Amino acid sequence: MIILLGKSREKNTELQKLAGYIGLPCAYADLNEKTSSDAYTPWRYYAHRGPDDLNKPFFWLDLEAAPYWSFRAGDIRRGQINNSDEHLADVYFREPYEDQCIDRIEWIKNNEVYAIDYYDASGIKYAQAVVSEGAQSLVKYCDVNGTPAVFVWSDTGIVNVKKDNQEEIYADTDQFYSAFMKDFIADQKEDTVFFYEPELRKYIPEDSRCILFIPDQVPGEIKDKNFRESLSLIVTGKPGLVHSVRQLYGEGEVPEILEIGSVIESPAKHPVQDALVVTRSQHIEQLQPLVEGLPELHFHIAAGTVMAPGLMEFDRYENVTLYPNSPREKILQLMDKCAFYLDINHYLEYEGIVHAAQRMDRLVFAFDNTVHQKGSMPKEHIYRHEEADRMIADISRAMFDPNCLQEFMEMQRNQIGITDGQREALKEYILKGQFRNA
């Protein structure tokens, strides 16, 4: 059993993928969400509640109500509770709104909200807030019977916790989180904690083994002396990260470091007729020969800003769709529907998109004058920029020959993925507290 500690939904998901790939059971602690369907949170933990396994939808019309109350439809996001013509409360729904499952109820008196009830996905009221002058002055987190167990005073930051028939008082949420981690680790009978965000180290007891993962770039915070007990495991295959870690420490004590590859997501059943290109400029190497030489391949070309006229001209091709002013979320949605990512744009790479494509198990090809992550790509997937015809031939083979596609994908996975030896080295450390060479 290992403990995963997170505060960012994106990085929490990465931790869970890594733990699943290693093949060890884990308990997940989330310091960000008040309630979670897959994690322990400080607020739920002291209410004797763990992850929400019920996942039973709770519709607002199922609320226990006085006989004289009436429910009225509002807009798609909310409804109302009324007593005749008196407006008692607004009921806000959680997404998807059309299901009309309760997220919170805001109670109203004299046209002002005076209290808020919060519900989890299973319809259990997990918190009650007292509202004064438009702000929450006190929030009480409840157990499954509705009995308050954790009290958070918004104006002072003080947290009161009822546990073991006693009351503990913490001056702020930092003290509260630290106490939670100490109790949670003892409860799980485990002292190995995985985490991504360096700032979370302060919540982990000093006598616990903790593993800081560095996925893309080295955070400057790890130079802090508080991290000498941490164990930095370089998850990404990005070249130079281990060297950068050692440089940060200079002559100081450097933590043990195990360099491993990336967790590659399970191959998606994406269509092989689609490719993505993301650019910061209109300069895309050999775009016209590629578009004209691969009429069966649909090119999705996205940019985070407006597109220059030279790039907009490609809108005339039937197998090209342009996406100007696309946020990262939109670009990842496009990636989800494509089998290929073509790293053929000049100048800067868009927000680590090549590494994201590889981890999503998309086949990446590049030219020698555009490649942004040369160290993480098989040399066979990097083409001389004068030889667009070779790239066209290989993409065509991958589109129409499943065996060829599989061969290309295995080359890429072997280049960036976690090897069996690395996985066993990490597992051995977790179980025995010591590294061996992978």
Image (tube, rainbow, N blue to C red):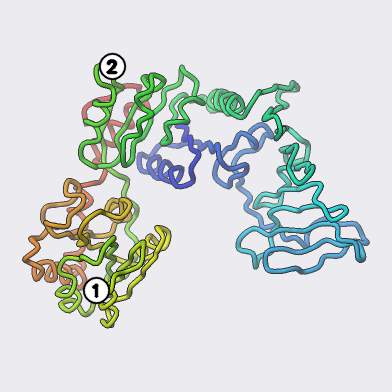
Residue at 7 percent across and 60 percent down: it is 384
User: Residue 266, relative to residue 272: is it above or below?
Assistant: above
Given the image, on which type of amino acid does mark 1 rest? Gly
Which residue position is annotated with label 2?
252
Asked whether residue 230 appears in the rendered view, the answer is: yes
How would you rate the neighbour count of disc 1 (Cα within 10 Å): few for under 14, some for 14-19, many for 20 or more? Answer: few
Residue at 28 percent across and 27 percent down: it is 257
User: Residue 327, relative to residue 12: is it above or below?
Assistant: below
Q: Which is nearer the N-term, disc 1 or disc 2? A: 2
**x%, y% of residue 422?**
26, 35
Which image quarter holds the C terminus?
A: top left
Given the image, on which type of amino acid does mark 2 rest? Gly
Which residue position is annotated with label 1?
310
**x%, y% of residue 169?**
70, 22
**x%, y% of residue 269?**
34, 65
Q: Nearer the viewer, residue 221 or 355?
A: 221
Residue lying at the far front of the rendered structure: 309
Marks 1 and 2 close (CB-CB < 8 Å): no
Q: Secondary structure at mark 2?
A: loop
User: Disc 1 versus disc 2: distance between alpha carbons?
Assistant: 53 Å
**x%, y% of residue 134?**
76, 46
Asked whether residue 1 appears in the rendered view, the answer is: no
